[in-house]
Each structure stands twice: as structure tokens, then as C-alpha cells.
Amino acid sequence: MYIFVWGVCMLKIGNVSIEKTAALAPMASVADRAYRTICKEFGACYVVGEMVSAKGLCFSPDKALDLITVTEKERPMAVQLFGGEPEYFEKALPKVLEFKPDIIDINMGCPVPKVTKNNSGCMLMKDPKLAEQIAKSVVKNSSVPVTVKIRKGWDNDSLNAVDFAKRMQDCGVSALTIHGRTKADMYSNKADWNIIAQVKKSLNIPVIANGDIISPETAKDMYDFTGADLIMVGRGSFGRPWLFKQISTYLKTGKYEEDPTVAERMEIMKKHIALICEDKGEQVGMKQARAHAIRYLYGIRDAAKYRERCSRLTSFEELLTLIDDILKNQN
């Protein structure tokens, strides 16, 4: 269902209104609260948190509190759960709902072996009956809309996305996200937009398209090619949170601003890493910030030299020194 508010197209997932531009995909160890906040500031219309184990929430809830906490700046936001046992989803759900997420998302698409070996993530696409039990349990017990994220299949010999998506719709989920790769693909090969289009044509609920959106042009192409109700950007935004603003502007006007200058990019990076340290403490935060810092440096002069320094960052002061050196070298 779409509504229009002052010329802006809004998608409805259950009772949640989302602007039809670009959402931030859930990315473990990347899309944490700091990154979600930065992306929201640049116009991400919707964000999904890092996946959290339903079973882990039942046995060690304190360890997962950070993953299910929702701040007002992040809304609308989904908390994403993964697991392979319906009973743990049912037990974990009340703990998650205490934090008032806008949406509960079930991960049935993660290809990482440490997830799939536990009958979780994309492994559920090999066991549709178990997936149905989980989806039905969450839908029945959730007070907010429930969505599911899948891939095109386990491998090229089991491309069951269309049938699987129909099963999820029949379970009562409010929307479905599909990444156009198989589990076997991991993150290589080109995402298959044809399978996304097929899923879209087969469902009555909103379909969110994910895979190979790396620019405003590819964002529009994804909408046009698949007919998707919403698009979701993952790795294409890593180190480029301004991509969400570019996509939004391009979809509305057909034009967008060029990438930020090196100086502007460094200010964004500094703000982002400051948020990480504020959230997690400087010692832990700077370790996790290294990968982000490396991504922000792509394309600048002597990037390789500075990336090596990024990999050794231990304090925010070191980051400031690095930024000063980068800016001096760009003139």
C-alpha cells in the first residue's frame, strides 16, 4: 500500500510508514547503532539492526541488549532475529518487544557457515516447513509487523525463492526482503534481479529488493527492473553513508550531488567514529572503527599508506592525527 504526503511516496508495512527511497540492510559488525544513526542522518528511510540470536536472548539476554535497543533517531527500525528453533523465538519475542521496535525481521538469508550450521539463516530455505513454524510463531506473538529476509535459494540447484516467499506470505508476514544471490554465492557473482522481479510478481505483500545497489542510478534501475516496493542498500553504503541522500535526491529530482570532498569525507568519518566510541567506549570503539576508517579512504591520494595506519588505530587522538596528515597531503 502506498500513500502520498506532499509529493513523497510512502510505503506501508503493517502500520509502519516508510518513505520509498532506500533502506539500510542489516550487516553484522558493520550496521551498528553508530552506523545506523549516520545513515539515517543522510536519509536512509528505514534501518534493520544487526542480527541477534533468539536462543542467545533466552539464555544470555544481557549480552544482546545492545543489539535490540532502539533509539528514536533510528526509527523506523527493525530488530532482526535468527535461529532454528520456533520455541526460542517465542520466548525471545517479549524481551525484544520491550524495546519497542517498529518491525521484527526474521533472518532466513544469512549465508555465513557459523549461522547456517545451526539450522539458521539461509539453511531455513532448505527446510520450508521449519521456516513456516518460525514465521507463524513470530507473527502470532508479535504486536508489531513481522518481515522475513531471504536469498534466491541455497544454490543454483535449489532456486526456491518464489515458492518460499509465497509460504512466508501465507504465514502472515507483512513484507519480504530478497537478496538476489544464493547461499553458495555468498557475496560474489552478480545479484540476480530477475528472481527479485519474479518474487515481486508472485506476492501481494511489499517486496524489498537487495543486491548490487551501489549508486543512485542502480537504485533507480532496481526499482524499474523489479517493480520492488522498496530497495535496501548494504555493502554499497559501507564508507559512503551519503549514498542514501544521493539516492533519495536522484529518485525525486533525477539529479544528485557529487561525492563529498576529501575534507568533508573526513568530517563525516570523524563524526561516525566519535559515535562508535561514545556508544562502546574508546578502547573497543577504535578497534571496531578501523574497518570503517579504511572504507572512508577509498579513492584518496596515497590511500594504501593511510589504510595501513587505520588498521593500527587505538585512540581517537590517533584518528585526528591521521585526518590532519591526510588533509595536508591532499593539497
Image (tube, rainbow, N blue to C red):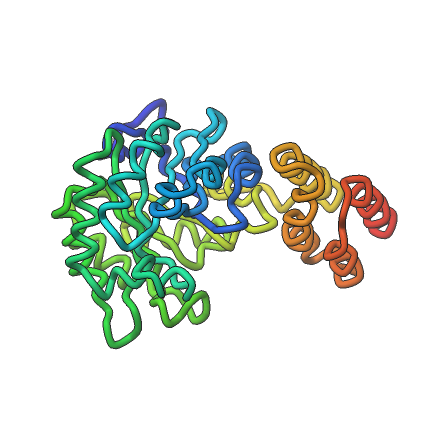
Q: Foreground residue, 180 or 221?
A: 180
Q: Quadrant of the N terminus?
A: top left
The residue at the point 76 percent across, 50 percent down is: 313
The residue at the point 72 percent across, 38 percent down is: 267
Residue 194 appears in the figure: no
Q: Name, please, the residue furthest toward the bottom.
A: 157
Quadrant of residue 316 within the rendered picture = top right
- In x, y percent, where is residue 98? 35, 27
Q: Does residue 63 appear left or right of residue 108 in this picture?
A: right
The residue at the point 54 percent across, 42 percent down is: 256
- In x, y percent, where is residue 165? 20, 54
- In x, y percent, where is residue 185? 39, 70
Residue 275 appears in the figure: yes
Q: Does residue 133 appear left or right of residue 288 in this picture?
A: left
- In x, y percent, where is residue 293? 68, 50
Q: Name, please, the residue furthest toward the left.
A: 170
